[in-house]
Image: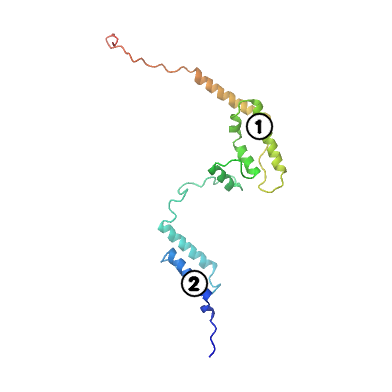
Amino acid sequence: MGRQEPGPAEDPRVAASRYRIDRIREDVDDGAPDEPTGDAGSSTATDRTAYVETVIQQAIRRGEFDDLPGAGRPIPGLGTTHDPDWWIRRKIQREGLTGIGPPALQLRVEHAGLQERLDALTRESDVREYLEDFNGRVRHARLQLLGGPPVVTPTCDVDAETAGWAARRAERLARMAAQVERPAPRRRSRLRRSRGGRGLP
C-alpha cells in the first residue's frame, strides 16, 4: 500500500508556524484572544486589527505603558507651523549638537539665534563681518544641488541688523550705568543709642 502524501494541514512548515504563534501568544498573555489562524489567507485585515488592538489594551491595563518619557505633558511643537525637518531639529536641540546636519538646517538654527550671536559681539565691524559671512553662506547653500532639504533661510539686512545690535547694546550699557550710579544702601550702625540718649559702651 503506497505512502499517503501529507495534506496541507500536515505540512511541517505550517505546524512549525502555528507552534511559534502559540508560544508568542503564551508570552504575551495567557488570556489574550486567539489570533485568527485558519488556512493561509483566511484572516482578514479587520481580524488582525482587532487582535492587535486587544493586545494593546491588555498591555495598557497591565501598566506596560506607564511612566513613558513625556507622559502627561503636551507634545512639544504641536500646533506650530509644519517643519519637514522637525525630527532633525529636535535631535540637535536635545543633544546639544553643533556643526552637523545639512546646510539648510544649520542655517535655519543659526538664524533662529542670530540676535544672541550678534549681542555677544562688541564691535560694529565684527557685527557687519559676521552678517556678511552669514549672507554669503546662505547664498552658497542655495546654489548647491546635492539634495537635502531646501534652503528657506532668508538673508539678513546688514544695515538693519547692525542698527538693531547698536540699539540693544546702548540699552544694555544704559542699564549697567544706572546700576553703577545707584548708591549702595547704607549699612545701619551696630551702635545704637539707648532711649536715654547715652551711647552703648
Query: Residue 67: horizontal and vertical position, in percent?
Result: 43, 51
Quadrant of residue 136 within the rendered picture: top right
Disc 1 designates what residue? Answer: 130
* Amino acid type, label 1: Tyr
Q: Is residue 139 left or right of residue 109?
A: right
| C-alpha gap between disc 2 and disc 1 | 67 Å
Quarter of the image for residue 141 reads top right
Helix, strand or loop status at disc 1: helix
- What residue is rendered at 50% in x and 21% in y? 179
Q: Residue at x 51, y 64 (%)?
A: 49
Under mark 2, the amino acid is: Arg
Residue 32 visible: no
Question: Tag 2, which secondary structure?
Answer: helix
User: Is the residue marked by circle 1 packed among few (<14), some (14-19), or many (20+) residues within 10 Å?
Assistant: some
Residue located at (48% from left, 65% from top): 51
Q: Which of the numbered marks, if any, corresponds to residue 2?
A: none
- Indicate whether 175 appears above or below 23: above
